[in-house]
Amino acid sequence: MVSSGFWVVFEGADGVGKTTQVELLAAHLRSSAGGAREVLTTREPGGTPLGVELRQAIMHGDHVAPRAEALLYAADRAHHIATKVRPALEAGTVVLQDRYLDSSVVYQGGARGLGDEVERISLWATEGMLPDLTVVLDMAPDPARMSRDLDRVERETIAKSEQMRQGFLARAALDPARYAVVDAARVVEAVHAAVVEAVTRAMGRPDALPLEPWGTP
Ligand code: TYD
């Protein structure tokens, strides 16, 4: 099945500004300067009504077993792609999405130690759907925080966000043509300009339109 839409996913550690950049890019692409495109913004987990319920289950206060957590993210993803993202792409819409499969690979596969199977589960859940471009918003842990006297919990939080960061960078390095790593440690407008440049370049790629983002995984 051939789609005329274009699918951009934003990834990165918590707090790098993904939501802001999704909104700014959406406004740009909807404007005449950006091509007056039809744009859908969405996110995982929680991009559909069922997803909102699954998100609540995942964020559930008590401990959730790591494999249960991975499957809840995959269930959210399967439903989100089948009922919202794929139909929008088939209708020619540009889809801008906050988090996707790489978040599962980095958080559940890496941080929770579930390994490579997490990626296979996600690919099964989505019938192999992969975005046209993944923008990794990259930011080193805040130097201002690092220079202070840190307690153990703060040190662990910083170490964890650096681990996430390296996870996303490693994913990007595997497929440079389909990833753009953007330095997110700058003012919002500068990050937005770099995002627009990367997305415009990707949309102009000869293989971009029409595209076949899904195949046999
Ligand atoms: P959210 O409040 O959306 O955070 P953010 O604004 O940083 O995206 O919560 C999403 C959380 O879920 C975030 O900590 C990352 C995590 N997550 C996973 O662990 N695995 C996944 O597959 C996804 C999509 C998110």
Image (cartoon, rainbow, N blue to C red):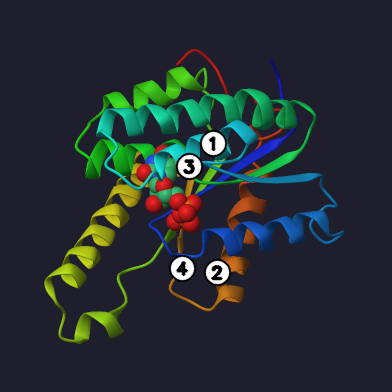
Question: In the image as oriented, which residue stretches furthest toward the front?
Answer: 62
Q: Amino acid at mark 2?
A: Val
Find residue 14 and report its horizontal and vertical position in percent.
Answer: 40, 59
- Is 158 situated left or right of 98 in this image? left
Residue at the disc numbered 1: 53
Secondary structure state at the residue bearing disc 4:
loop
What quarter of the picture does the N terminus occupy? Answer: top right
Residue drawn at x 30%, y 44% is: 62
Q: CA distance from mark 2 to mark 1?
A: 32 Å
Badge 1 crowding class, 10 Å Cα cut-off, few under 14, some 14 to 19, many 20 or more, is: some
Badge 2 crowding class, 10 Å Cα cut-off, few under 14, some 14 to 19, many 20 or more, is: some
Q: Amino acid at mark 3?
A: Gln
**Is label 3's Cβ within 8 Å of ligand 1?**
no
The number of numbered badges drawn on the structure is 4
> Which mark, residue 191?
2
Secondary structure state at the residue bearing disc 1:
helix
Residue at the disc numbered 4: 184
Residue drawn at x 37%, y 38% is: 104
Q: Are marks 4 and 1 in contact (CB under 8 Å)?
A: no
Q: Earlier in the sequence, mark 2 or mark 1?
A: 1
Q: Quadrant of residue 203?
A: top right
Find residue 179 and report its horizontal and vertical position in percent.
Answer: 47, 46
Secondary structure state at the residue bearing disc 3:
helix
